[in-house]
Image (cartoon, rainbow, N blue to C red):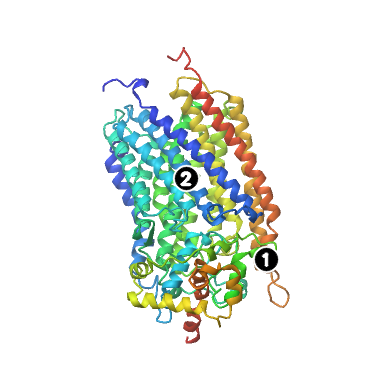
Amino acid sequence: MGITSKPVVFAVLAAVVILIGTTVTVFIPLFMPSTQPVSSYIKPYTAVEQEGRDIYMREGCNNCHTQTVRPLRTEVLRYGEYSKPEEFAYDRPFLWGSRRTGPDLNRVGGKYPDSWHYKHLDSPQSMFEKSNMPPYGWLAKNRLDTSYSFKKTSTLGYGYSESDVRQQIDQYRLTVTDKSYPSKESRDKITPPELGKQLTEMDALIAYLQKLGRDVKKMEATK
Amino acid sequence: MNKTSTEQYNYTIVRSFAFSALFWLVIGLIVGLWIAFEMFNPALNLTPWLSFGRLRVVHTNALGLGFGLSAIFATSYYILQRLTRIPILFPRLAQAHLYLFNTVIALGALSLFAGMNTTKEYAELEWPLDIGVVIFWVMFAINVFGTLIKRKEKQMYISLWYIISMTVAIAILYIVNNLEIPVTLFKSYTVYAGANDANVEWWYGHNVVGFIFTVPILAMFYYFLPKSTGLPIYSHRLSIVSFWALNFAYLWTGAHHLMLTPLPEWIQTVAMAFSIFLIAPSWGSVVNGYYTLQGNWDQMRTNYLTKFFIAGITFYGLQTLQGPLQGLRTLNAFFHFTDWVVGHVHMGTMGWVTMVISASFYYMIPRINNTELYSVKLANTHFWLILVGQFIWTITMWIAGIQQGAMWKATNPDGSLMYNFLDTVTSLYPYYRLRFAAGVIYFIGILFFAWNLIMTVRKQPSQAEL
């Protein structure tokens, strides 16, 4: 073949061959609304939930937990309604995962009270003796850094103003530090006193976990 | 530069990349052993830096990018010079490539330890390091194409085709998948959302494996197998057909990683069909390898390098059958998310990739030092240890995967689930212990490999060759 003596022509031809499948299966779907449909029931993450999502990513939770329930009978039995494309419209990046060392988390929102998560994240083994999940109690000892929260939510196009973001953060701080917060006891147990009145990384992570799969229930209910 | 004698070739860069590869291999395996232990003993998650979620990414990046890429650069620079019969066109650029590459990988490891992590699998590095990766890739590409254009050998041999397609494909894959908007120096968000992000990511994830762990390894295989055995490749025509079919079909298959997810079904089905098609070009190379040895199978006993290549291509053959089959929707429903897939990946990396790179280094390093290998006996021990280690490792994980997949699906007569999730995890601990032991066996084999090469370069060059 003549092209084996023409390296540049060879490279161009290789690029064309590589780009055919790429164009059909990746580039074209990017411009098809059916690939990632949107629904008015699915709301973007609040600034605090987004901070929690970033901590989930920082700690690599996605290496053990998936976030996509497949339409299989036993999977729906175990986790709940299978995942719908609309739920991921605000997920940048997606966090579906590839290995289920721990259970799927796409339907974990609202499944347990916050107190369960404080206890479990602090010491998974205190609740499940033989669990192999790493302990994350140290997240409660880190004050949540919200200095980039507005920049993050505007980069992600959530449409919040700076005061919206401030309000979301203040409101969640008041919720978890309030005397009547139902999970106050378990939060206080692992949060150092000097952070008692502030938001910790643990608070944000739990806010995120509680958001997972919540909006889609409303969407399904109206179908 | 009219002379083409051996002394004129730039072998310093080949040696430097080869030893970078050994360094990252040892580091990546130590991290691998650590996380393998954490899987049945979470007490090893001593600090945030040593927790599984962060370390797993250090493991995959140190081996995939650190070890894989530097081995590819070492062998590519060697093959390129030999097959064009001229030295590397820009030696200083190659030197800068070496320094930048190792700096990016080292900073990459540190940043992943620190939790700066985009979470896109095999593309976890944050945006400043992505730019570093693109720069060193361009440096490499300039030398590849510059040297090819100035070459003295008219026809480009098969190995050079594979090096060209890797150079082009990795550039496209890496740039498209890593398009992201920075928030701070250490944090960015991808431009793609949800299902689109998943589709782009697994197009990348599948093909980065294809164009790092398949294509350049085939370049090594097609060059070093004939060199080591003294036998020409069985069929040139078969290698042409395999090459173009592989490069065409590979890019359609990424979505078999997303079976039964919210990604549109047609993309999944197309991926499934092309995955099956991909068996043909993959086995084209397997058949080509086996038939090259036709009538000379005694070399499996007499030539220590031959068995590395033949064992390697055998694992490649098994890998490329297993992969498309577990990509089928029905089988995927059972195997996906289990340790079966972990076993699958490691047959490819611990079997095919490491076997071929090992033999290529054993061929290359003594020659560029004008000496003999320090110890063939040690090389044989290395072969058997990594073979046995890998076998125990992967088979253990396949069994673990089948068991957990079955437990997830098991129901009582009344239709309720038979096992809670934790039961399915704790039942795997015996397998995890065995897997760790297999990893230790494999690691000892790799230490012999590294020791053998270090002792080889420390030997005085033999007088006869000078």
Quadrant for residue B302, please give it: top right
Chain where mark 2 sits? B
| Residue at mark 2 to residue at mark 1: CA–CA distance | 42 Å
Q: Could you say whether the residue bearing mark 2 is in a helix, strand or loop?
A: helix
Callout 1: residue from which chain? A
Q: Where is residue B319 shown, x and y percent of the image?
A: 55, 48
- In this view, which residue lies farthest toward the right? B413
On the question of residue B300 being in view, the answer is no
Q: Which residue is mark 1?
A: A126
- Asked where in the image residue B423 lies, by quadrant, the reply is bottom right
Asked if badge 2 and badge 1 are on a common chain, one would say no
**Residue B432, above or below A211:** above
Q: Position of residue B288 (x, y in %)?
A: 49, 38
Kindly identify which residue carries mark 2: B213
Amino acid type of the residue that numbered disc 2 sits on in the rendered structure: Phe
- Residue shown at 49% from the left, 17% from the top: B460
Question: Which of these two is toward me, B145 or A142?
Answer: A142
Mark yes or no: residue B232 visible.
yes
Q: Residue at x 38, y 37 (%)?
A: B98
**Image quarter hosting the N terminus of chain A:** top left
x%, y% of residue B143?
31, 36
Label disc, if present, on residue A75 of the rendered structure: none
Q: Residue furthest bottom?
A: A222
